[in-house]
Image (cartoon, rainbow, N blue to C red):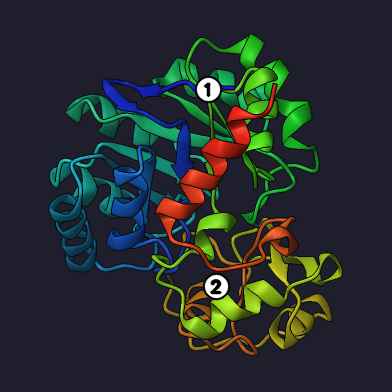
Amino acid sequence: MKLPELKIGEKIAKVPIIQGGMAIRLSTARLAAAVANAGGIGLIAASGMSMDELRHEIRLARKLTSGVIGINAMVAARKFSDLVKTAISEGIDLVVAGAGFSRDMFGLGKESNTPIVPIVSSVKLAKISENLGATAVIVEGKEAGGHLGTDQSVKSLIPGIRQAVNIPVIAAGGAMSGCDIVDLIKLGADGVQMGTRFAASEESNAAPALKEFYLKARPEDVVVIQSPVGLPGRAVRNPFAEKIMNGISPIDKCDACLKKCKQNFCIIKALIRAQQGDVENGLVFTGEYIHKIEEILSVKEIFAQLLKEAEVTN
């Protein structure tokens, strides 16, 4: 199957793939630009960044590509609104919002004509999003990495949401191959969001130790922990995840980074530790099928592989 283009607002991606915005600092300018140059939509993970750092990353991405660049930000973060406003002021192409839901963000998008794309996991929230002004929705199933909003598979969610809304529907969770992309498009998706596959790419800002940790993960190593944002999260089992699952709270000094926090641990600091290569004491978010990744490839190689697989899939 020849994959279709993906149009979100006035922006068109030649390949219907959005690279997931993986925080903290896994998805920076280098990765986002490489994805955009390959024909997809690259996302910079804004959560955990200062406003100056976010501006720097957006400007760097613009120097590296003329393709479509967006940000992903956690709604649960206290600085969510400031991050969105900063990105919009820098002329970002779209804003993807996950780990919560905010009605206010749609107003910010309307003022600047910036597409707002919320991550949803139900027909109800997809319809609310469309009514509030969402340009598209990313429908995330239980197979996704990071924060989860449902226990249903993405393949079970897509058909109903496709029928319920008249805006682009992007499937997220479980897509690892070109065949997976074709299957989701046949179910009604206009495109896919892929995070885990790009976390283990050459251009990912993950430390080498974290990338190697990804390659060693087996199916039984993937677990679900309770995040301080109030949602379950999918991660790779390690000593830190074991503590969380056993009810031990390895709390750091609280920086009040979330609007509401369960205070069982500091998610920002835990994600930073993992990104920097501390795979024993960091939180390693991942999708359900991390075990399918066998080698670290460049974004260009990943896209070539996905397109080749899609072409031979009927």
Label 2 Cα crowd, 10 Å radius (few <14 / some 14-19 / many 20+): many
| Mark 2 or 1: the one toward you | 1
Q: Is residue 57 visible?
A: yes
Q: Position of residue 164 (x, y in %)?
A: 63, 11
Residue 48 drawn above or below residue 255 = above
Q: Position of residue 50 (x, y in %)?
A: 26, 68
Q: Position of residue 46 (x, y in %)?
A: 35, 58
Q: Is residue 70 visible?
A: no
Instruction: Indicate the secondary structure of the residue bearing disc 2.
Output: helix
| Quadrant where the C terminus is found in the figure | top right
* Residue name at image x 54 percent, y 66 percent: 200
**Pointer 1: what residue?**
2
Q: Quadrant of residue 181?
A: top right
* Residue name at image x 72 percent, y 65 percent: 226
Q: Position of residue 67 (x, y in %)?
A: 24, 39
Disc tally is 2
Q: Is residue 64 left or right of residue 84?
A: left
Of residues 298 and 236, the one nearer the viewer is 298
Instruction: Indicate the secondary structure of the residue bearing disc 1.
Output: loop
Gap in angstroms between the C-alphas marked 2 and 1: 40 Å
The amino acid marked with disc number 1 is: Lys
* Residue name at image x 79 percent, y 28 percent: 156
Question: Which labelled disc corresponds to residue 267?
Answer: 2
